[in-house]
Amino acid sequence: MDLSDINYFFDCCLGHWSIERTYHYLTHPEIERSHTDFQVEVITPDLKHKVLTDNAYPIPDHLDTLPGFNLVFHTVSDKGEAVSQELRALFVPKQQSDGVITGDYLRDRAYEEARPIVSSFRYDPTNRELLMTTPYTRVVSVDSILLVNPNMRIRRILNYQRPEAGQPLDTLVLVGFGVEQKMA
């Protein structure tokens, strides 16, 4: 499996990012704006192992080649609400077809629910988009990061009401958009 382009994507993600987002709540008439400072660092081999262990996920032979990161962020909404979090994320590529890589996306702490979680990801090198789908208890979050260049990303967050098993995602409850610029 050729991981050179996804590794480039993750290398570009390292550093300090300044993020402006807008969230549109569809269950009630509300629009929220927020500013986030992200610090993205390389994930150490010990933390990779911890993420896998926290998720009771088998340790692959090629642990050192798995892309991932250590992430610390602080968000302040336009209402003055502040949230800070630190987490580790690891991407386990499973399949590659026509350059598109799919696999599992693991975190030691999820955004919506404070617990380890295994999600899925799809990375398309033609437009350098990372699409992550996470089934939470009440919603399914489909999060896209589009790498425009090494210093700018566009973010799209779609949260769907979690459907019954086997049913399509068709009821949006939140839509978010963001412009992410690297500061250093």
Image (cartoon, rainbow, N blue to C red):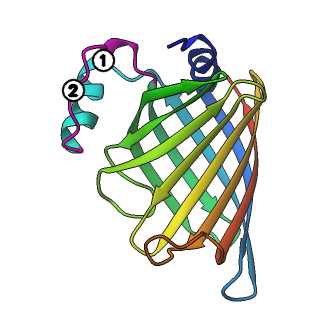
- Residues drawn in magenta: 55-67
Q: Looking at the image, do the residues carrying marks 2 and 1 touch, with CB atoms under 8 Å apart?
A: yes
Q: For residue 112, what is the image quadrant?
A: bottom left
Q: Residue visible at 59% across and 10% down?
A: 4
Q: Residue visible at 24% across and 44% down?
A: 55
Q: For residue 64, what is the image quadrant?
A: top left
x then y, percent, for residue 128: 72, 28
Q: Is residue 117 left or right of residue 151?
A: left
Q: Is residue 87 magenta?
A: no
Whole-angstrom CA distance, mark 2 to mark 1, is 7 Å
Question: Of residues 153 and 35, which is closer to you in this image?
Answer: 153
Question: Of residues 64 and 165, which is closer to you in this image?
Answer: 165
Q: Residue visible at 67% across and 40% down?
A: 145
Q: For residue 131, what is the image quadrant?
A: top right
Which amino acid is tagged 2?
Ile
Helix, strand or loop at mark 2: loop
Q: Residue visible at 58% across and 39% down?
A: 38
Q: Is residue 155 above or below residue 150?
A: below
In the image, which disc is placed on residue 51? none
Residue on which disc 2 sits: 59
Helix, strand or loop at mark 1: helix
Question: Of residues 95 and 117, which is closer to you in this image?
Answer: 95
Judged by its main secondary structure, the magenta piece is: loop
Which amino acid is tagged 1?
Leu
Task: Specify few, some or many for label 2: CA neighbours under 10 Å numbering under 14, 14-19, or 20 or more.
Answer: few
x then y, percent, for residue 92: 40, 29
In the image, which disc is placed on residue 63? 1
Q: Is residue 171 left or right of residue 29?
A: left
Task: Specify few, some or many for label 1: CA neighbours under 10 Å numbering under 14, 14-19, or 20 or more.
Answer: some
Question: Of residues 37 and 159, which is closer to you in this image?
Answer: 159
x then y, percent, for residue 72: 47, 40
